[in-house]
Amino acid sequence: MPRDMDYYTLLGVSREATEAEIRERFRSLAREAHPDRAPAWRRSEAEAKFQELAQAVNVLTHPESRKVYDFERSIKAATGAPADSVAQDYLAQGIAAYKEKRYAEAAGNFGLAARRDPKDVRTHHYLGLAAARSGDVRTAVRALEAALVIEPQNARLLVDAGAVFRQAGLLYKAEKAYQEAVRWDPSALEVRRALEEIRAQRAERERSV
């Protein structure tokens, strides 16, 4: 697959598509693109296309692989003022460490990148995810709060922030983040379910006080 191919575009799904939606879309495309349906003279081309679809669905339906893929795509798509090369180097090192599940190391590099370029929402976002994975929930919460100050309407960021706030036991913050995520992406069924669970948790907590 060409390095600049976008898996979301290839499958024809949104960047917020759920795993179930992605799998269903793949099944639909795979039926049409299966090599057995192609004439002999197009078999090799059909096999290559089918492999591309399989690679895309394998990445986008694996949570860790999808996060890493999204990280890498966001770097390639970044626009605006010239990036701080040192910050970008830290960011790249953080992504590499995150991909290998060295979350504490990844968080350290993302933290350095964020200090070099405090207005870059990606570094705060990635720091929040990596810190949460490494068990440093306090740093994760601060990082995601900083990211939301920069981009309060970023649906993906709001979903991740909601999950981390929930992990930290900050149910009110989690509920607020999920509410905003649903407002910007009403079709996000998984987020709606998480929001309902949060509200049930808060109600149970209030009853037990």
Image (tube, rainbow, N blue to C red):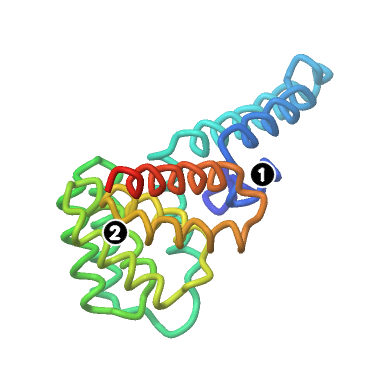
Asked whether the beta carbons under mark 1 and mark 2 sit within 8 Å of each other, the answer is no
Amino acid type of the residue that numbered disc 2 sits on in the rendered structure: Gly
> In the rendered structure, which disc, 1 or 2, sits on the residue that comes first in sequence?
1
Q: Residues within 10 Å of mark 2 (few under 14, many from 20)?
A: many
Question: In the orientation shown, which residue stands out farthest toward the bottom?
Answer: 81
Q: Which element carries disc 2, helix, strand or loop?
A: helix
- State the SS at label 1: helix
For label 2, the residue is 128
Quarter the N terminus occupies? top right
In the displayed structure, 68 sits above or below 88; it is: above
- Residue 59: x %, y % from top left: 49, 37
Q: Is residue 133 left or right of residue 179?
A: left
Residue 56 located left or right of residue 130 = right
Compare residues 55 and 103 and report the one nearer the observer. 103
Q: CA distance from mark 1 to mark 2?
A: 29 Å
Could you say which is closer to the camera, residue 112 or residue 38?
Answer: 112
Q: Where does residue 131 sit, x and y in percent of width and height? A: 22, 54
Q: Where 36 falls versus 182 (above or below)? A: above
Mark 1 residue crowding within 10 angstroms, few (<14) / some (14–19) / many (20+):
some
Judged from this view, the residue extending furthest toward the right is: 39
